[in-house]
Amino acid sequence: MSVNACIRLDLAAVRHNLATVRARVPGARVLAVIKADAYGHGLLRIAKTLDSVEGFAVARLDEALALRHAGMSQRIVVLQGFVEPPELELMSQHALEPVIHAGFQVGQLEQASGIQPLPVWMKLDTGMHRLGFMAGEVSGYYRRLSQCPTVRQPVHLMTHLASADEPDSSDTPNQLHAFRERLRGYPGEQCIANSAGILAWTATHTAWIRPGIMLYGVSPFAGRTGEQEGLRPVMSFRTRLIALKNLPTGARVGYGGDWVCSRPTLMGIAAVGYGDGYPRHAVAGTPVLVRGQRVPLIARVSMDMINLDLTDCPGVAAGDEVILWGDGLPVEEVARHAGTIPYALLCGITQRVKRIT
Ligand SMILES: *Cc1c(COP(=O)(O)O)cnc(C)c1O
């Protein structure tokens, strides 16, 4: 029996993509970024598939604890660090590695007592202006961290690139220059590159790298696909046709009647909508695969259904599988039609969608 909205995960593709990362940056240690439920793919399933990596990076403490509770013993970096002392204590108890990006965290490390020293990653703000220490703060806080008894030495060092997906931008060279300037002589291990850095900027390749989106087989660059980077898509988002209907020329379709049939139309209804994470802003003409053939979305996306124009797709029947993205239809292309980025589509799959491997 075919099923309503579900995602299928190709775990062999995850391993292939990790091998591609390693081939791009031989010898680097990999912090696999699996925040946000592994970009919507399922935290534990992806973590277990990637268990040969040297470490994982997650955004928040609860994601890291879920990994520890599942028995993962790799290094785990928590990109947002801690905000309050009890969170610091939990991180120490579970041998997690917080990113230290603000002065108040240094104060809490100094005041903590009776905790196991923990490795920390000092984050420099080299131009992204989100988390991290500004130029004038680095040496003072670095000194305090390097003398702090609750910090395992040496202090590791990182920064995040704001525009690595723009090959012509001078932001990345500027950020690299700022990072090196401020850290001259500090002994800790360094980590800079995200997927775009790995693929486009060899100068960002340091002891550690932090691939995210490319592990899932998706390109970080606008206008390119994962396949063009030698990657394989991991997620395929599918559903089935639940109805077919013949409409006359002039029939208005869907909420608001925005779509008007310009010819006698065989319309299909597929069981997926924004309630499943299909983007509501996907415009008419967004491609969908039915029987391996590209067909256009028509009318507005509803919560549980979308409308397809199947006039040029003879032989279709209720129950036929519909691929929304994945094998044969890059999520990058759907994102473009929906005015969003593939990251948001992958993360946006909702709870009711079944995960199948
Ligand atoms: C999400 C994230 C990454 C991974 O970025 P990709 O573009 O998915 O490779 C790396 N570092 C930090 C700090 C992040 O937040």
Image (cartoon, rainbow, N blue to C red):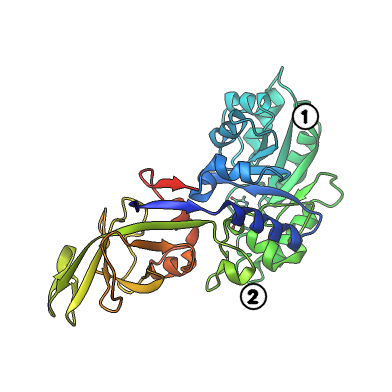
Labelled disc at residue 148: 1
**Number of residues whose C-alpha sits closer than 10 Å to that of mark 1, classed few (under 14), some (14–19) or many (20 or more):** some
Residue 202 located left or right of residue 101: right
Q: Residue at x 34, y 73 (%)?
A: 295
Labelled disc at residue 47: none
Residue 1 located left or right of residue 192: left
Q: Residue at x 50, y 56 (%)?
A: 235
For the residue pair 60 and 46, the one nearer the viewer reads as 46
Mark in the foreground, 2 or 1: 2
The relative height of residue 103 versus residue 243 in the rendered view (above or below) is above
Judged from the image, the secondary structure of the residue bearing numbered disc 1 is loop
**Location of residue 120 in the rendering, given as x and y in whole percent from the top left corner:** 72, 37
Visible residue check, residue 348: no
Visible residue check, residue 206: yes
Label 1 beta carbon within 8 A of ligand 1: no
Q: Amino acid at mark 2?
A: Asp
User: Residue farthest to the top?
Assistant: 114
Judged from the image, the secondary structure of the residue bearing numbered disc 2 is loop
**Number of residues whose C-alpha sits closer than 10 Å to that of mark 2, classed few (under 14), some (14–19) or many (20 or more):** few
**Location of residue 219 in the rendering, given as x and y in whole percent from the top left corner:** 57, 65
Q: Earlier in the sequence, mark 2 or mark 1?
A: 1
For the residue pair 151 and 322, the one nearer the viewer reads as 322
**Location of residue 240 in the rendering, given as x and y in whole percent from the top left corner:** 32, 58
**Residue bearing mark 2:** 168
